[in-house]
Amino acid sequence: MNGKITVKLEKQETGRIAVIIKDTGIGMTKEVQMHIFERFYKADPARSRSNGGSGLGLSIVKKIIEMHKGHIRVESSPKEGTEIIVVLPIAP
């Protein structure tokens, strides 16, 4: 268990800021990536409310980001880790 998580902040020429969170974990298939922002979706069906989550976290995160006129996306490959990119406008 020697995984790594990195967080990077980049100012974009478009007047926006990108927050990039990357890990070296197990990654996700394209099928899982298509659903991770859906309410109540759990990539691991063995997870239950009693042992870790309701499946609402990322759908709430996405909604908050959109309310701030931003967007979120995921890039991932199985066995290669995951990268989450959040782009938000820089407040005037």
Image: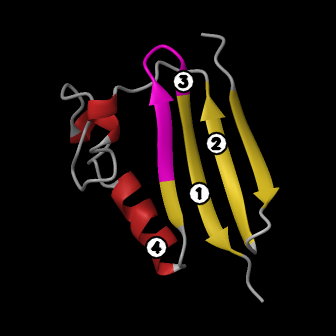
Discs 4, 1 touching: Cβ within 8 Å: no
Task: Name the residue at 38% across, 63% down.
Answer: 60
Image x and y of residue 85, in percent:
59, 50
Q: Earlier in the sequence, mark 1 or mark 3?
A: 3
Task: Name the residue at 34% across, 26% down.
Answer: 29
What crowding class fits label 1: few (fewer than 14 Cα within 10 Å), some (14-19), or many (20 or more)?
A: some
Secondary element at tag 2: strand
Q: Earlier in the sequence, mark 3 or mark 2?
A: 2
Secondary element at tag 1: strand
Magenta-colored stretch includes residue 77 = yes
Image x and y of residue 65, in percent:
51, 69
Residue placed under numbered mark 2 in the picture: 21
Discs 2, 1 touching: Cβ within 8 Å: yes
Exactly how many numbered labels are in the figure? Answer: 4
Callout 2 amino acid: Ile
Q: Is residue 60 left or right of residue 23?
A: left
Q: Earlier in the sequence, mark 4 or mark 1?
A: 4
Residue placed under numbered mark 3 in the picture: 81
Q: Quadrant of the N terminus?
A: top right
Residue placed under numbered mark 4 in the picture: 66
User: Residue 86 shows which numbered tag?
Assistant: 1
In depth, the one of 11 and 23 nearer the eye is 11
Q: Earlier in the sequence, mark 2 or mark 1?
A: 2
Secondary element at tag 3: strand
Q: CA distance from mark 3 to mark 2?
A: 11 Å
Q: Looking at the rendering, which quadrant does residue 70 occupy?
A: bottom right
The overriding secondary structure of the stretch rendered in magenta is strand
What crowding class fits label 4: few (fewer than 14 Cα within 10 Å), some (14-19), or many (20 or more)?
A: some
Instruction: From this view, report whether residue 26 is shown above or below residue 73.
Output: above
Q: CA distance from mark 2 to mark 1?
A: 8 Å
Q: Is residue 15 left or right of residue 66?
A: right
